[in-house]
Image (cartoon, rainbow, N blue to C red):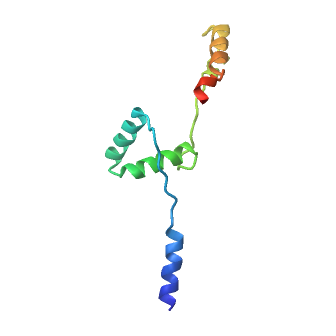
């Protein structure tokens, strides 16, 4: 009877959540397939690794870059133009959220 209990407990631990992801952009699909082929892993494994990295759960921290750092270099850029451009990028288009 112990073997059956151990088997059932092992089955409980192995349950995973499954997702269906729709409308994957072509560029993301191509990049995932390229990564899977280069690393010789399944497309599923490549997608899981990418998701973990994107959520900051991978082995290496995610470093986000911002153009705002260019504003800290006086004389190299037109600060007013950059500030205006970045301000416009911060605007949310309600049409994108329908």
Note whether residue 74 is visible.
Answer: no
Above or below 73: residue 6:
below
Point out residue 74 in the picture as x, y percentages from the top left corner: 66, 11
Front-most of residues 74 and 33: 33
Note whether residue 56 is visible.
Answer: yes
Q: Determine the image quadrant of residue 77.
A: top right
Point out residue 94 in the picture as x, y percentages from the top left corner: 64, 24
Above or below 23: residue 89:
above
Instruction: Please state, as top left, top right, bottom left or bottom right, where the C terminus lies in the image.
Output: top right
| Residue drawn at 31 percent across, 45 percent down | 37
Point out residue 38 in the picture as x, y percentages from the top left corner: 32, 44
Point out residue 80 in the picture as x, y percentages from the top left corner: 68, 8
Above or below 12: residue 62:
above
Count of numbered circles in the view: 0
Left or right: residue 6 compared with residue 97: left
Front-most of residues 95 and 74: 95
Name, please, the residue furthest toward the bottom.
Answer: 1
| Residue drawn at 67 percent across, 13 percent down | 83
Front-most of residues 74 and 53: 53
| Residue drawn at 42 percent across, 36 percent down | 28
Left or right: residue 94 compared with residue 49: right
| Residue drawn at 44 percent across, 38 percent down | 24
């Amino acid at each position: 009877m112990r073997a059956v209990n151990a088997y059932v407990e092992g089955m409980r631990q192995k349950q995973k959540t499954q997702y269906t992801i729709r409308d994957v952009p072509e560029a993301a699909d191509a990049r995932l397939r390229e990564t899977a082929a280069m690393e010789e892993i399944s497309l599923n494994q490549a997608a899981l690794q990418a998701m973990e990295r994107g959520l900051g759960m991978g082995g290496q921290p995610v470093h986000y870059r911002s153009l705002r750092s260019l504003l800290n270099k006086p004389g190299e850029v037109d600060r007013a133009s950059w500030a205006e451009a970045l301000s416009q990028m911060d605007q949310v288009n309600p049409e994108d959220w329908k």
